[in-house]
Amino acid sequence: MEKTFDHKLNTIKWIGIITMLIDHMGYFLFPQLLWMRVIGRIAFPCFLYAIIEGTKRTKNYKKYIIRLLILGVISMPITPNTLNVIFLLALFSLSIKYKKYFIVFLLLSIPVEYGVYGMLFGWGIYWMKEYNRDQGILFSIIIQFIMGVSVQAFSLMALPLFLGNIRIKLPKVSKYFFYVFYPLHQGILIFIVTWINQ
């Protein structure tokens, strides 16, 4: 019998993937539909949570972080004007693996998508999960408003998912699925937008 926690992590991955797709469809195809971007705010914290678990569970951390960095490089043509969020996830993973170098990784996150906000929000979730739930929640809330009130604050909607005991059984997300899906779905959406605008 599979552990309940495995179902929880798997469900959170699915929620992250689905809400990311909704968000990117809103960004590329339906920019006038704000609700799609609001729902999409759930995706980023779900992937932060998955990174926390992946960093802790992986049997070979070196391969794990290299896969993330390769995905970031492969995805760069899709987001040519910025270092994409995959690099942020890699830096976040490194910051919780090698905590004494936290400041270094935080500074490196400045030019990356989600930047310092993403790193600190990730640490709020990490603190909530690994150390003190209430402190982590409070820090996560404070970070949203320190960085300025915006639609990004709807990311807080994801926090109850991390606190609950989810027992939903969904098809297992292969550890390689996201590495294919992330650049592929964005490439398809960009192709559709280009075709529509011809």
Image (tube, helix red, strand yellow):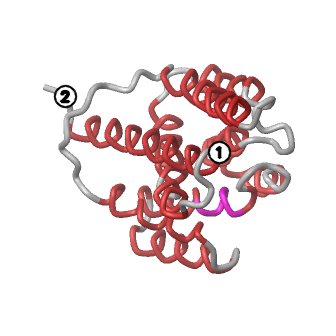
Direction left: furthest residue: 1
At label 1, the amino acid type is: Phe
Q: Nearer the viewer, residue 100 or 170?
A: 170
Please tell me whether residue 54 belongs to the stretch shown in magenta.
Answer: no
In the image, taking residue 147 as reference, residue 36 lies left or right, namely left
Q: Quadrant of residue 63?
A: top right
Q: Quadrant of the N terminus?
A: top left
Indicate the position of residue 73 as horizontal and vertical percent values.
77, 27
Indicate the position of residue 135 as horizontal and vertical percent values.
47, 74
Indicate the position of residue 38 as horizontal and vertical percent values.
50, 62
Q: Quadrant of residue 159?
A: bottom left
At label 2, the amino acid type is: Glu
Q: Quadrant of residue 182?
A: top right
Which contiguous range is marked in magenta? 117-121
Q: Main secondary structure of the magenta part?
A: helix
In the image, taking residue 167 as reference, residue 99 lies left or right, namely right
In the image, taking residue 192 as reference, residue 39 lies left or right, namely left
Direction front: furthest residue: 198
Residue position marked by numbered label 1 in the rendering: 28
Disc 2 versus disc 1: nearer the observer: 1
Q: Nearer the viewer, residue 123 or 111?
A: 111
Examine the rendered structure and indicate whether residue 186 appears above or below residue 140: above
Examine the rendered structure and indicate whether residue 153 appears above or below residue 43: below
Q: Quadrant of the C terminus?
A: top right
Task: Kindly identify the residue that appears in the image at 52 percent across and 75 percent down.
Answer: 141
Task: Kindly identify the residue that appears in the image at 32 percent across and 40 percent down.
Answer: 11
Dot 2 or dot 1: first in sequence order is 2
Secondary element under disc 1, as helix, strand or loop, is: helix
Residue position marked by numbered label 2 in the rendering: 2
Q: Nearer the viewer, residue 145 or 121?
A: 145
Indicate the position of residue 76 as horizontal and vertical percent values.
79, 31
> How far is the residue under mark 2 from the one under mark 1?
38 Å
